[in-house]
Image (tube, rainbow, N blue to C red):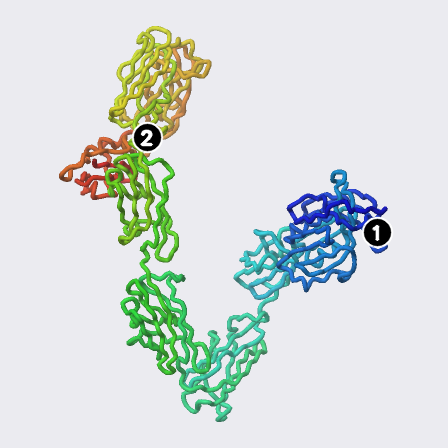
Amino acid sequence: MKRTLSSISAAAIVLGTGIPMVLADTTSTTPSYTQVGTVAFQFNGQTVANPYILDSQDSGNTTAFAPVYYFNQLLAKAGIQATWNGSTHTWALTAPNIDASKVQVAGGVGTGNTTITLNGTTIKMINTFAAQDPAGKKGDITTYFPAYYVNNLFAALGISATWNGSTGLAVNTQATALTAKQTAATNVEVNFNGPVASGTTVTLSQNGVNYTTTATWSGTTEVTLNTGYNLPAGTYTVTAGSLSGTVTIAEAVPTSIEITTKGLATVSGAAVNYTVLDQFGNPVANPGSITVSAYDSTNGSLITGSAAGSSNSVSLNLASGVAKNDNVVVTVSDPSYALTATTVIPVVGVTNIASIKLGAATENGTTNLTTGTVTLAYTATDAAGDSVLLTSGVASNGIIDGVQFLSSNSGVVNPSSLQVDGSGNLTFTAAATGTATITAVDLATGQTSSVVVNIADANAVNSFTLAAPSTMVVAGQATTIPYSATNAFGQAITQSSFGPSYQGDITWQTSNSTVLPVSGVSWNESNNSLEVTPTGSGTVTLYALDGGTIESSLTLNVNPAAYAYAISGTDIPSEFEQGANYTFGSSDFTVKNQYGGTYSVPIGDSWTVTSSNPSVIAVSGNTIMGGSESGTATLTFSLQDGNNKVSYNFNVSEVPSSDVATYTLSAPSTIYASSNSAYYGAVSVTGKDSSGNTVAVNNSATVAQLLTSNSATVAIVSNSQIEGVASGTATITALSSTGSVLGTATVTVSTTPPAPASASFSEASFTETTPNTATAITTALQNLLSVKDQYGVAVSGASGYWFSNNSSVVAVSGSTVYAEPEKGTATVTFVTSNGVTATIQVVNN
């Protein structure tokens, strides 16, 4: 059946930008075809599409046709862009990494109504036709390509593709096989017939035993396995994922000898160097059976020399009887392996450094040079062109082995500091930072070579940049300022490495000392973070300077100091038994500042509480008590924070004991074995009603007796206290007056002596009016300091040390802390004798 498509618009589609429709040409006729059904188009084992296949005639043969769109998809995954133009009947392929002139498709270019190009070059012509795609909507016409010819095209492009009329087209760009060969005594080279996925592990094994190897990849199709040692001869298995192959390993044996010396000096001990090579062309250890003979063919005399050792070198005696320009026939043999090498070496006279070239200066393997010992690379040859090393020794007037060393800046590099060690390594001492040009002059030939060395300060800061803080800046609070820095070599300096040696390079200035004085900028010694503690609100610009030059600036908007703004919640029980009591403190409340953040209530702030019905809930100071009557009372808590006062109303009910549905016994998990009452463990019960609300229980009335499962470990002091007796564990049980169990708790007794375990200041900051003279504030700080041992017991008079990060504001002398006359902020740190720390901000106003 013929069908004219003149009414259908031609459209070009670039791979990945359209759908499989309206791709047909406008001039072709549609031959008769048979709808076969769907097959799978797969890429590396994953199904990309399931197109409908049509069978039709091509060159007298029945073949399968598929929509060009789906071929485009496969090509895209293989990294090739495909564009179909229905007007010109051109399928244009673009692959910059493929040379079109070298692509040969089976059957040659051929003929047909469609041209296939690669990078603009025609590589194949085939017949295509347009037809309805059964997968599309009615009227969706697309162009069908013969699968057989496209399969050949894929092969020509280096893409492994397999067409099966029943299952479909499978494209595989990954390796399906590997081969391996030995390239050295310790190396196996593995080649794949396609790319291997990144991270693929390649193993070498024999009889189920894996050998440790180091893998070095060359692209994605070749890897060299190095064992670091000679493998025993035999057959080994190479495995990479699901692929495997075998390799035969042969023992490395001496196969040839190479004499490397090009000229001989007329001295006693002229060196003849040689190398023994294995069958892989790699040097092998001298087998020790080498013999060397030498004959002066010019004057007809034998030349004596030292016996060959294991250093791949032998010394010949050319001190007398041998003249410059004589030819010496040297033979090196290894009878054990029947190896012989013979060469003629000319006599070049007394050897000198005929050529020297200076290389890179390095320190500890890098080109980042600082003051100290620096290694200077060089290459040197003698008159015969043989590589030689400078003679070991220290430069005399800058001369080593006939080479004069000069320096353009002797303050940085003094030529007299150059020396050569026993291995021929040339070093010098960099005495100061700066730049110097080192020049080597061969005094015999006049040949020169120079190298420039730059010596930098290892602790110098090259760049320093401030960044905006991630949190609000508030007066009176320390805020961390992010920063980045590089060293003299342009390398990033991590914050953990930006210690005092770097910090000392940076100085500070501010645009408004009322808002942020310079003394309010400090380094946190614990982690090298940068902190600012403004003393007032407003706008201020912070400048970071290095050597008087501004490196970076940062403008900060400082908000007024935080204060208690609202109380948003409490942990106080909402229900009380008659006679129950609860002592509250700041920790029982969630206090917010005016910025919505949590506010740390200073110790000096005072709390008050009133009850709307003292008969129901009574209060006394900071203690709340269940009254004599049932009901509900409103407790009003007030916090006086400086000039600001905030209040919080909380309803509390007195409930009968019968409302308590469950009890829980609370006891410390670990106590110290001591008769000191400070280490007694407090035991109490709490209750919950049927709705899960916490009930404050009258412990004295509720707990009739405490029991211990092991009195030798834990003793009962009272119905509310226990004592640790000896190391071990015991179960504590609380009984009611009726003998019912209220709750149990497991307590462990430790005999580990108490030691400071935690330290903290009760306030985040301490403010001192700036004195005219240094004023001791140690006692004031100690009053804010709390040190507790591992059992939670306060350590009275804990010994320790005081430190300040800003001695101009707060200074430490011995065990005394002084507030200095300068206004500003300092971070003061207390460290116990066993290393427990606590910090506080001290502000001089």
- What percent of the width, then of the height, locates residue 42? 70, 47
Residue labelled with disc 1: 57
Q: On the image, which quarter does residue 80 sit in?
A: bottom right
Is residue 702 visible in the rendered image? The answer is no
Report crowding for label 1: few under 14, some 14 to 19, many 20 or more residues within 10 A (C-alpha): some
Is residue 178 visible in the rendered image? The answer is yes
User: In the rendered structure, which amino acid carries the disc numbered 2?
Assistant: Tyr
Q: Quadrant of the C terminus?
A: top left
Q: Residue furthest bottom?
A: 299
| Front of the two marks 1 and 2 | 1
- What percent of the width, then of the height, locates residue 191? 63, 60
Determine whether the residue tagged by mark 1 lies in a helix, strand or loop. strand
Depth check: 374 or 129 in front?
129
User: In the rendered structure, which amino acid carries the disc numbered 1?
Assistant: Gln
- What percent of the width, then of the height, locates residue 519? 24, 42
Mark pair 1, 2: CA separation = 92 Å
- What percent of the width, then of the height, locates residue 237? 63, 57
Image position of 570 with respect to 192: above or below: above
- Judged left or right of residue 109, residue 603 is left
**Which residue is painted at 57% across and 71% down in the image?**
281
Residue labelled with disc 2: 791
Report crowding for label 2: few under 14, some 14 to 19, many 20 or more residues within 10 A (C-alpha): some
- Judged left or right of residue 317, residue 214 is right
Q: Earlier in the sequence, mark 1 or mark 2?
A: 1
Q: On the image, which quarter does residue 427 sit in?
A: bottom left
Determine whether the residue tagged by mark 2 lies in a helix, strand or loop. loop
Depth check: 779 or 604 in front?
604
Q: Residue furthest front?
A: 7
